[in-house]
Image (cartoon, rainbow, N blue to C red):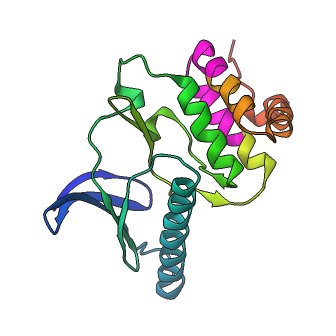
């Protein structure tokens, strides 16, 4: 297995399962936690991530196909393509807005919805890394998904995304209202030292 990346909680490796190019996301033990607590956290977070991916897929969002679930690992199909943040292609942010709307309609909140977690492969866009995902109706969390993307893309791209999100997600008005409220809060304000 060849390591592809490493995050705060997990390492991602390239592998093959029955001849199929795959990746495995493996949650790593944390020595600073009590072993029993660490294992329970890793187990429940792995299960929650897989559940969020499945729910997003059922809602019509492209995600990596799940191949197997281990105690602390998720085995999934290996996608080709590039991260949205690394591509120069003319990606339709309208398509990204529809994807987010479908996830939110299914009460899947990504938790880190940025161009770093979207893979573009030709005409297809896939949402990846559901490690911070939650399943729930929280308008606050849905608004935070919007805020993360808004802060990560140009104003034109965000407007395109927000327009299709609003048209696709029937409960979008409270999300936009909460987004405006969040942006007024002190810790989300952009500050200048000047």
> Quadrant location of the N terminus?
bottom left
Of residue 194 and residue 18, the one placed in the foreground of this image is 18
Is the residue 109 above or below the residue 98 in the image? below
Q: Is residue 157 magenta?
A: yes
Q: Residue 35's spot in the image, x, y percent? A: 46, 85
Q: Is residue 67 magenta?
A: no
Residue at image location 36% in from the left, 18% down from the top:
89
Image side of residue 107 versus residue 29, left or right: right
Image side of residue 6 versus residue 99, left or right: left
Image side of residue 31 versus residue 169, left or right: left
Q: Which residues are magenta?
A: 144-160
Q: Residue 192's spot in the image, x, y percent? A: 69, 17
Q: Residue 59's spot in the image, x, y percent? A: 59, 52
Query: In the displayed image of the protein, which residue is found farthest to the bottom?
Result: 36
Is the residue 189 above or below the residue 142 in the image? above
Image side of residue 8 versus residue 179, left or right: left
> Quadrant location of the C terminus?
top right
Q: Quadrant of residue 48?
A: bottom right
Query: In the displayed image of the protein, which residue is found farthest to the left?
Result: 19
| Secondary structure mainly formed by the magenta segment | helix
Residue at image location 67% in from the left, 54% down from the top:
106
Of residue 180 and residue 78, the one placed in the foreground of this image is 78
Q: Quadrant of residue 137?
A: bottom right
Q: Residue 27's spot in the image, x, y percent? A: 40, 68
Query: How many numbered marks appear?
Result: 0
Residue at image location 30% in from the left, 56% down from the top:
77
């Amino acid at each position: 297995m060849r390591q592809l990346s490493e995050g705060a909680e997990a390492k991602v490796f390239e592998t093959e399962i029955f001849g199929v190019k795959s990746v495995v996301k493996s949650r790593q033990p944390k020595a600073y936690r009590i072993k029993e607590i660490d294992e329970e956290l890793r187990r429940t977070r792995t299960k929650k991530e897989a559940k969020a991916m499945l729910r997003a897929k059922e809602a019509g969002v492209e995600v990596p196909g799940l191949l197997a679930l281990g105690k602390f690992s998720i085995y999934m199909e290996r996608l080709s393509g590039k991260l949205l943040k690394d591509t120069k292609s003319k990606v339709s942010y309208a398509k990204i807005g529809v994807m987010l709307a479908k996830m939110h309609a299914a009460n899947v909140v990504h938790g880190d919805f940025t161009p770093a977690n979207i893979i573009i492969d030709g005409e297809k866009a896939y949402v990846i890394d559901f490690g911070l995902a939650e399943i729930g109706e929280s308008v606050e969390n849905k608004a935070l998904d919007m805020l993360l993307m808004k802060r990560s893309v140009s104003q034109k791209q965000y407007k395109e995304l927000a327009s299709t999100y609003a048209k696709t997600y029937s409960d979008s008005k409270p999300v936009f209202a909460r987004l405006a409220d969040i942006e007024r809060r002190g810790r989300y304000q952009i500050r200048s030292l000047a």
